[in-house]
Image (cartoon, rainbow, N blue to C red):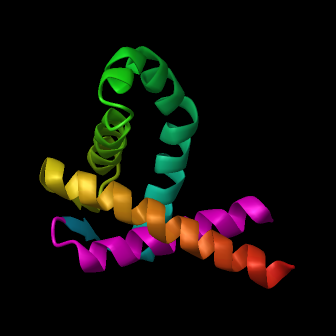
Amino acid sequence: MGIIVRLLLNALAVLIASQVIPQIDVEGFGTALMVALILGLINTFVRPVLVFLTLPISLLTLGLFIFVLNALLFWLTGALVSGFEVEGFLGALLGSILVSVISWLLNGIWKGLRT
C-alpha cells in the first residue's frame, strides 16, 4: 500500500512541476503516473550505477555533479515516456529539483498524517 501511495504522490509532484516549469509538458495524470513509475525504476536501477561511475567527478565538484546526473535521468524519462516532454537541459535540471522537493514534502505530509 505504501508503494502505491508514494507512486501517486510522485505523480502529483510531476504534475505540479509541469504547471510551474514551462519546459515540462505532461498530457494528464495517467502520463504523470507512468513518469513516476519509470523515474522510480530508473532511480532504483540505473542511478546507483551512474553515481558509482561518476564518483571521481562528483568528488571534484563537491557533489554538485549529482544535480547534473539527476537532470539527465529526468531528461531520459522524458525521452522514454510518450506524452511527457522535457525541453532542454535547464528544464530537466529545474524539473528534477522541483519534483524531488515536492515529492519530499508530500511524502513528509503523508507520513505525518498516518502517525
Residue 27 lies left or right of residue 36; in this view the side is left
Quadrant the C terminus occupies: bottom right
In the image, what residue occupies the spot 26% across and 59% down?
94
Q: Residue furthest bottom?
A: 113
Q: Of residues 10 and 70, which is closer to you in this image?
A: 70
Q: Position of residue 48 (x, y in %)?
A: 53, 27
In the image, what residue occupies the spot 31% across and 22% down?
60
Q: Position of residue 112 (x, y in %)?
A: 76, 79
Q: Of residues 113 and 9, which is closer to you in this image?
A: 113
- Number of residue marks: 0
Q: Of residues 106 and 62, which is closer to you in this image?
A: 62
Q: Position of residue 47 (x, y in %)?
A: 48, 32
Quadrant the N terminus occupies: bottom right
Residue 87 lies left or right of residue 54; in this view the side is left
The quarter of the displayed image where residue 98 is located? bottom left
The quarter of the displayed image where residue 67 is located? top left
Residue 26 lies left or right of residue 21; in this view the side is right
From this view, report whether residue 66 is shown above or below residue 88.
above
| Residue 59 on the magenta span | no
In the image, what residue occupies the spot 36% across and 31% down?
62
Q: Position of residue 87 (x, y in %)?
A: 14, 56
Residue 6 lies left or right of residue 86; in this view the side is right
Please, what is the dominant secondary structure of the magenta stretch?
helix
Q: Is residue 49 visible?
A: yes
| Residue 6 on the magenta span | yes
Q: Is residue 30 visible?
A: no
Part of the protein shown in magenta: 1-23
